[in-house]
Structure formats: structure tokens, C-alpha cells
């Protein structure tokens, strides 16, 4: 059975657990046959969800009878969604549908508590999934996407997009250090994709000088496959790789809206976490990358321009992603000497939500790291800024903070006894 979750956007909203992750559906055709307007409305809402952006969804009324009549004369799509009436004989209807259904078509049945057909019999007749109604938008999204999710042995990539509310706020530095924390502290295989073609700094921050990178993938004559992408990656540590930007002005980088779709889709097949370092610009492809990401982090400095931009971005992204958790934001370079700042509390009040973290202004620490091509954790793993990046990494990956074991009154005595033993 598929369950929906509360998607309230309150200021104290908690990040979702990693179990809530839904991988996007591929380019498939889906036809639904509904008995009630409530189910049709849920399907209509699901059709505009970012995870079904590539799916072509058609909604009709009439349920099982309408589906059988339709497919007597036309071929079946990749997926059929059937809502059944309470008390009707589902098994007989499925037997009749099977006689007109093309091989390879997947069937999702939306039933009710009054259905008496055993799930085993439904599976035997080719039903891919069975959902108890009434359904919500996320139930539909999860049902369709779940049909095409990779097996448990194959990781399905989670895309995290990091972008600055304004140029020069240190969004790239945050992105690179968070990716390092995801790889080192969470031990998740990760890839950083530097999307600032002309001025990207990821290769400098990781002290790498790769000859190839994201430009080779996006300008490739054919759709890039996993083997091709693998050859373009520069290894940063055991769990982290880099798809670097050329950082060259030899050409102008004007991209279409879907220019990076093939690269992202290929990366999802092999990499558990993909961190996008998105430049501060507003175009079709940057908007698409942000809306299509699984999680978003906006980096802002505590001033008025950043406040306005961050608020505008949050408002737009919430509207474009109604079934996802709200984008997160963090404050960077907080406490710069002699600079008037908006306090984190006032910033949160205007944004209508607290920041994920407030990273202090530390020019010596960040300057040393930048000049040495190192991450903050490489300079001082125990520094509070390093711990802040680990905190952000935990929240963005849906893992939350690791729980500390409860202390016991007898712990000191037990430890002494163990030491003597």
C-alpha cells in the first residue's frame, strides 16, 4: 500500500527522511481511467509534478469499462491506471483487459477497502501496483515513478542544487564543502558538477586540473552514457568525484532549456548523490535545474538584496514544486566586521522560515583553504565550520543528525571496570 505524507510548508518543517525519496519517471505514456472526480483531480495535479515532467499523462473517466472499450481499437500505453468501483468484480475486468492489452504495459489499480480480490490474484493477472483510495497527489506520483525505479542493488541518484541568492555570496564554496562532507562523513559516493562554464572554481577548490569535464558531456554529439561520463570525472577522494567546468572564455556558453537533461539522467543511474554548483544567473536551464532537483540550498548573505532575492527564489520554487519539501537556505559570511547586517532572526522572520545554518565570516580560514586548494575539513576537521557543513550535508541528504546514545549514571563505573579488564 502507498501512503502519502504531510507537505505543509510551516516554518518548523522537518526535512524528509531518505525513505521519502521518489526517483523521477522516464519518458513514458500514462493513461488513467477514473470513476470519481476526486481521483481525476489528484491525477491532474500529479501530471504537473516535476518527477513526471517527462511522462505524458492522459486522464479519462469511465474506469475499467472505458479502458476495455478504448483498447479494443487503439494500442495500450506504457502505463494504465484504473480506478475501480467498490464491490465490482476486479478480476473479471482484468481478465478482459488482458485480452486487449499489449505486452509490456504496466497496470496500476486504485481500489477501495471494500475490494475482496486478494493481492496475490491481482499480481497473477499482471497488476504492477494496487493502491487503496482515495488517493492524493503524491500517492499517484509515487505509484507511477515506483514502476520504473531501479532495483535496490542499483543506486538512484539524488540531485542537490546549490545556488547563491546573489553573486559573490560563496555559494560555490558552500557547495564544494558540503559535497566533501557528504562523501567523507556520510560515506556516500558523490559527484560535484560545476555548471559555471566560464568562471567555475571547483577545480581550484579541489586542487584538480582535469583536461575534460562537463563541457565535453553537454557538447557531445551523442547522448552521453555512464562509461563516457566516468571518463570525464576527476577523483577528489575515495567517495567524491568532480565534473569540472572548463573555466575558459574561448566560447560563449548559451544553452537550451534541456541542455543538461541527458547528463543528469545518466548520472542518476550510477551516483547516489549529485551536487550541482549552479551559477548565479537566471535562464531557462538554471530554472529547470533548480526545479528538477530533489533538494535545493540557497546561500545568502545577511543583507537586503540577498533577502529580497532569496525570498523571490523561495516563493517561485515552492510554487513550481508543490509536492516537494520547501527549498532550504543558509546564511554565509555572517558577522563581517563593521558591516551592517540583518540578524538571522529578522532574516528568518521576513523569509518566513529559519535558516538551515549560519556560517560565520572567517577570512583567514576560508582564504587559506582557497589558496591551498583544500576544503575546510582538510585544514581543521574539528572546526565548528566543518561541523556546520556536516550538519548541512545530513539535512540535505534527508538523514538528519545522528542520534547520540543516552548516557547512563553507571557509565563511569562500567568504563573503569572495562579498563581494569
Image (cartoon, rainbow, N blue to C red):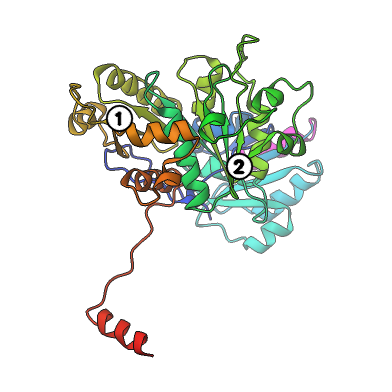
**Residue 22, relative to residue 319: is it above or below?**
below
Report the span colored magenta: 63-74
**Any magenta on residue 181?**
no
Q: Residues within 10 Å of mark 1 (few under 14, many from 20)?
A: some
Q: Position of residue 220 (x, y in %)?
A: 75, 22
Q: Mark 2 = which residue?
A: 145
Q: Quadrant of residue 104?
A: top right
Q: Determine if residue 296 is in view.
A: no
Q: Residues within 10 Å of mark 2 (few under 14, many from 20)?
A: some
- Residue 309: image quadrant is top left
Of the 4 image quadrants, the one containing the C terminus is bottom left
Q: Mark 1 highlights which residue? A: 333
Comparing 217 with 199, the one in front is: 199
How far, Cα to Cα, is label 2 from label 1? 40 Å
Check disc 2 and report its element: helix, strand or loop: helix
Looking at the picture, tell me which residue is in the foreground, 168 or 419.
419
Coordinates of residue 377 in the picture (x, y in percent): 43, 46
Amino acid at each position: 500500500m502507498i501512503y502519502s505524507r504531510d507537505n505543509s510548508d510551516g516554518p518548523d518543517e522537518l526535512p524528509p527522511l531518505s525513505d521519502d525519496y521518489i526517483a523521477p519517471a522516464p519518458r513514458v505514456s500514462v493513461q488513467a481511467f477514473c470513476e470519481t472526480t476526486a481521483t481525476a483531480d489528484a491525477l491532474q495535479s500529479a501530471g504537473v509534478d516535476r518527477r513526471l515532467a517527462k511522462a505524458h499523462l492522459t486522464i479519462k473517466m469511465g474506469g475499467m469499462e472505458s479502458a476495455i472499450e478504448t483498447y479494443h481499437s487503439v494500442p495500450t500505453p506504457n502505463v494504465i491506471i484504473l480506478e475501480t468501483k467498490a464491490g465490482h468484480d476486479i478480476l473479471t475486468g482484468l481478465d478482459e483487459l488482458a485480452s486487449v492489452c499489449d505486452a509490456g504495459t504496466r497496470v496500476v489499480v486504485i481500489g477501495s477497502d471494500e475490494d475482496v480480490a486478494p493481492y496475490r490474484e491481482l499480481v497473477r493477472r499482471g497488476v504492477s501496483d494496487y493502491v487503496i483510495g482515495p488517493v492524493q497527489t503524491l500517492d499517484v506520483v509515487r505509484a507511477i515513478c515506483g514502476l520504473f525505479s531501479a532495483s535496490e542493488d542499483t543506486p538512484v541518484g539524488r540531485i542537490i542544487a546549490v545556488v547563491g541568492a546573489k553573486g559573490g555570496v560563496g555559494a560555490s564554496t558552500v557547495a564544494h564543502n558540503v559535497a566533501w562532507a557528504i562523501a567523507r562523513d556520510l560515506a556516500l559516493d558523490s559527484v560535484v558538477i560545476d555548471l559555471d562554464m566560464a568562471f567555475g572554481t571547483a577545480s581550484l577548490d579541489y586542487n584538480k586540473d582535469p583536461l575534460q569535464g562537463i563541457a565535453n558531456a553537454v557538447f557531445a554529439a551523442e547522448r552521453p552514457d555512464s562509461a563516457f561520463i566516468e571518463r570525464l570525472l576527476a577523483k577528489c577522494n575515495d567517495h567524491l568525484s568532480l565534473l569540472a567546468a572548463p573555466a575558459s572564455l574561448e566560447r560563449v556558453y548559451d544553452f537550451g532549456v534541456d541542455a543538461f537533461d541527458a547528463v543528469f539522467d545518466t548520472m542518476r543511474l550510477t551516483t547516489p548523490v549529485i551536487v550541482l554548483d549552479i551559477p548565479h544567473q537566471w535562464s531557462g536551464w538554471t530554472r529547470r535545474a533548480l526545479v528538477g532537483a530533489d533538494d535545493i540550498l540557497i546561500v545568502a548573505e545577511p543583507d537586503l538584496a540577498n533577502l529580497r532575492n532569496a525570498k523571490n527564489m523561495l516563493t517561485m520554487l515552492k510554487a513550481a514544486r508543490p509536492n516537494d519539501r520547501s527549498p532550504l537556505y543558509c546564511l554565509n559570511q555572517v558577522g563581517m566586521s563593521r558591516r551592517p547586517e540583518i540578524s538571522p532572526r529578522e532574516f528568518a522572520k521576513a523569509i518566513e522560515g529559519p535558516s538551515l545554518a549560519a556560517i560565520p565570516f572567517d577570512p583567514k580560514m576560508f582564504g587559506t583553504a582557497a589558496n591551498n586548494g583544500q576544503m575546510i575539513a582538510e585544514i581543521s576537521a574539528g572546526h565548528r565550520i566543518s561541523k556546520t557543513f556536516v550538519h548541512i550535508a545530513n539535512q540535505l541528504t534527508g538523514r538528519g543528525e545522528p542520534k547520540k546514545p543516552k548516557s547512563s549514571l553507571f557509565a563511569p563505573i562500567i568504563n573503569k571496570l572495562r579498563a581494569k579488564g
